[in-house]
Amino acid sequence: MIRLKQSAALLALAAVTAACAGPVAERAFNDVATTAEQRIGQRPAWIKSEEDERAVRDTLDRLLARPLSADDAVQMALLNNRRLQGSFADLGIGAADLTSSWRPGNPGLSYARLRRGDETEIERGISIDAFSLLLLPFAAGIEERRFEATKLRIATDILQLAAQTRKAWYEAVAAEQTAVYVGQIRDAADSQAELARRMKQVGNASTLKFLREQIFYADATARLAKSRVMAVAARERLTRLMGLWGKDTAFRLPDRLPEIPPAPRSVENIEAQAIAGRLDVQMAQADLVATRRAYGLTNATRFINVLEVGYRRNSETGRPDQRGYEISLEVPLFDFGDAKATRAEHSYLQAVNALADTAVQARSAARESYLAYRAAYDLSRHYQVEIIPLRQKASEEMVLRYNGMLISTFELLADAREQIADVSAALEAQRDFWLADTDLSFVTIAPVDSGGTSGSSNGLLPRRSSLAAH
C-alpha cells in the first residue's frame, strides 16, 4: 500500500511538473539575466512575442538617436543579437527535458480476446516500468544539474558577446579616428608635394627632395584607402554583433576614443577572483557533479535494466475472473553492464581533468590579462605624458629655427612627419589600452578572446624609419 501511495504521488508530481515547463524556462532566463546584470550591469531580453519585439525596437530607436557609447553598443547586442536569441531557446529545451525527467515511462496496455467453441476468453493487462519509477528522483537530480550547466553556458555566451561588442566598439571608433587622421596626413602630404614641385621649378629643391615628397604623398594616399577599408570592416563587425541591418546601420559613433584614466586599476588576488567568479569554472564544476552522480547511479543499476510490474485480469465464459500481477525482469545473461560502468567511470575522469584544466586556464588568463593591462596603460600613458609633449616642444623649436632661417623647408617638413608617427603610435596605444581594459574586466567572470584586434590600424600610418627624408 505504501509503495502504491508513493507511486501515485510521483505520478501526480510528474503531471504538475510537466505542465510547468514554460514557467521553468522563464525562471531560468531570469536567473541567467540576473547573473549577467550582476556582472556587467546590463540585462538581456528574450524576444518571444510581438510585444517583446516592440519593446526592443523602442529601446533601439532611443539608443540610435544619439552617438553610441560602448555601453549603448553592448545593450543593443544583448537585446538584438539573433544568435544570442537563438541560444535562449536552449533554456526552453532544457526546461522541457527537466520536466520530462519526472515522468515515468508510459504504461503498457494489453487486450486479448480468444474463442474456443462457444467459450470466450478475454485477457486484459496494464504494466509499468517500476524500476524507472523508483529512479525518478535520481534521474531528475541529474537532469537538474545538466539544466544548471545549460544556464551557466548561456550566461557565458551573454558575457562573451558583451566583451566582444565592447572591444568591437573601441576598434571601430579607433579605426574611424585613424581614417580621419590619415586623411589629414594625405592632405598635408598633397600640400607638401605641391610646394616641393614649385620649389623645384624655381631651382630651390633638388630632384631627390622633390621625389621624396612625391613618394610620401603617394604612400599617404594608399594608406588612406586602406584605413578607410579597415574602418568599414571594424564598423561592420560591430554592426553584426549588435544585430543591425537596413537603416539602423547608419548609427553614429564618437569622433574620438575616451581618454585613459589618470591612474591604473589595482586588482588584488586576481587568480582567486577568476576561480570564484568565472562561469566556465562553475560550468565545469556542475558538469563534474552531474557526471559523478550519473556514475554512482550507473554502478548501482548496472545489473538491472528493466523491471516491469503489471496487473492482469482474465475472464472466461462461465468461469470467475482471474486477477493477479506479473513481474518482468531482464536477465543479464549477455550484457552484465560492465561496458556501461566503464563508460561512466571514464566520463567522470574526463570531467575531473576538464575542471582542473579549466581552473589552470582561468588562472593563467587572469595573470596574462592583468600584465597586458598594465603594459598597455604604461605605454599609452608614456605617449601622452612624455613623448607627445616632448614632440610638440621639439616642433615648436623647429618652427622657431625655420623662422630664423636656420633650417630649410624640407627639414621642417621632415620634423612634421616625425610628429605624425608619434601621434599615430599614441592613438594605437590608446586603443590597445581600452582593449586590454575590457579583457581585464571580463577575465574574472568569463573566458575572453584576447587575441589580435580585428580593427587594428597597424601598418596604416607612416613609420618613423621612412619619414626622415631630408
Image (cartoon, grey):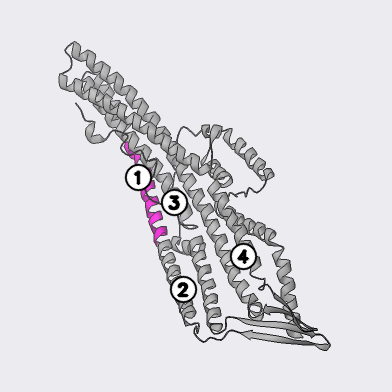
Between disc 2 and disc 3, whose residue precedes? 2
Name the residue located 55 percent from the left edge and 76 percent from the top edge: 293
The local secondary structure at tag 2 comes to helix
Residue depth check, mark 3 versus mark 4: number of the one nearer the observer: 4
Identify residue for label 2.
347
The local secondary structure at tag 4 comes to helix
Spatial CA distance of label 3 from label 1 is 17 Å
Identify residue for label 1.
379
What amino acid is labelled 1 in the image? Leu
Between disc 2 and disc 4, whose residue precedes? 4
Task: Name above or below for residue 446 compared with residue 54.
Answer: below
Q: From the viewer's perspective, tell me whether residue 234 is left or right of residue 29.
A: left
> Where's residue 313, x and y in %?
77, 83
Spatial CA distance of label 4 from label 1 is 52 Å
Between disc 4 and disc 1, whose residue precedes? 4
Identify residue for label 3.
439
Between disc 1 and disc 2, whose residue precedes? 2
What amino acid is labelled 2 in the image? Ser
Residue 22 magenta-highlighted: no
Residue 90 seen from this side: yes
> Where's residue 298, x and y in %?
53, 79
Q: Write down the region rendered in magenta.
A: 364-389
Residue depth check, mark 3 versus mark 1: number of the one nearer the observer: 3
Name the residue located 64 percent from the left edge and 75 percent from the top edge: 136
What amino acid is labelled 3 in the image? Asp
Q: Residues within 10 Å of mark 3 (few under 14, many from 20)?
A: many
Q: Which mark is residue 97?
A: 4
Image quarter of residue 117: bottom right
Residue depth check, mark 4 versus mark 1: number of the one nearer the observer: 4
